[in-house]
Image (tube, grey):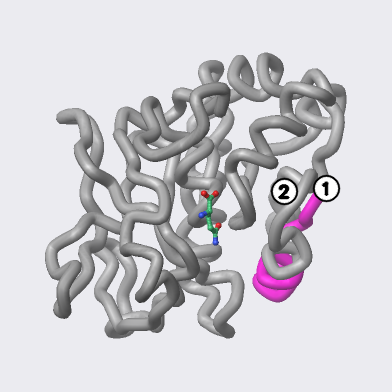
Amino acid sequence: MSTPVRIGILALQGDVREHHAALTEIGAEPVSIRRASELDSIDGIIIPGGESTTMSRLLVVLGLLEPLREALADGLPAYGSCAGMIMLARDILDTRPDAQHLDALDITVRRNAFGRQVASFETDLDIDGIDGGPMRAVFIRAPWVESSGESVQILGTVPDGPAAGRVVAVRQGDVLATSFHPEVTGDRRVHEYFVEMVRAVQGKQ
Ligand code: GLN
């Protein structure tokens, strides 16, 4: 049997526990990340859903912003869900002027993009590269991808309703992001997809 991959979860704020449970269930080893030194021992990192402006502030206060940015620039595979997608982006619309981000994905995201009235909803959508039929996607005050660079693959869009066609799942190299929260459903296919990405990187080393 192969050794489990060690996946860090940025554990400053947000739905850390849910990602922890999802990773454990699929045989990966979750590691909570709260300080820069902990970045050295992981094979990939998940930035959870939560509140991006709070996460940004805590990253600065704890001296984690630059080390994490550097680790990502050095090729640490990453997956961000919801606020995590916002944190990984190159540019954020509708945020606080002092909000920081990690510049790991060549996308511009719009925060709270689905509007305040229908801020939270669920739908079934297909993700490119994930077999087994559509997946239940839970959106909670979610962002969408407003625009993206050429090297960004669009993996999923909203299938119908007022936001039909909006981009909600992307990948660029070894960085993956979804606007929705697979960690709150029992469907582990996005986590499995990410763990496979991490294994593929290890295979190349
Ligand atoms: N609206 C939140 C933000 O701006 C994201 C919401 C979420 O992660 N569920 O960070």
Left or right? Give the position of 152 relative to 31: left
Comes first in the chain, label 2 or label 1: 2
Mark 2 and mark 1: span between their CA atoms? 5 Å
Instruction: State the residue position of label 2.
Output: 9
Picture coordinates of residue 176 (x, y %)?
A: 43, 46
Picture coordinates of residue 159 (x, y %)?
A: 17, 75
Residue 56 lies in quadrant:
top right
Residue 1 lies in quadrant:
bottom right
Residue 28 lies in quadrant:
bottom right
Left or right? Give the position of 35 relative to 13: right
Q: Residue at x 24, y 37 (%)?
A: 152
Q: Which mark is residue 57?
A: none
Viewer-proximal residue among 191 and 118: 118
Instruction: State the residue position of label 1.
Output: 32
Q: Residue at x 14, y 69 (%)?
A: 164
- The single residue placed furthest to the front in the displayed view is 117
Residue numbers of the magenta segment:
21-31
Q: Is residue 75 visible?
A: no
Find numbered disc 1 in the image and state the secondary structure of the residue it sits on. strand
Find numbered disc 2 in the image and state the secondary structure of the residue it sits on. strand
Picture coordinates of residue 170 (x, y %)?
A: 31, 49
Do labels 2 and 1 touch, CB within 8 Å? yes
The quarter in which the C terminus is drawn is: top right
Mark 1 belongs to which amino acid? Ser
Mark 2 belongs to which amino acid? Ile
Q: Residue at x 27, y 77 (%)?
A: 125
Q: Is residue 3 above or below residue 133?
A: above
Q: Is residue 99 above or below residue 18?
A: above
Q: Is residue 81 visible?
A: yes
Viewer-proximal residue among 54 and 136: 54
Q: Is residue 28 above or below residue 66?
A: below
Q: Residue at x 16, y 79 (%)?
A: 161
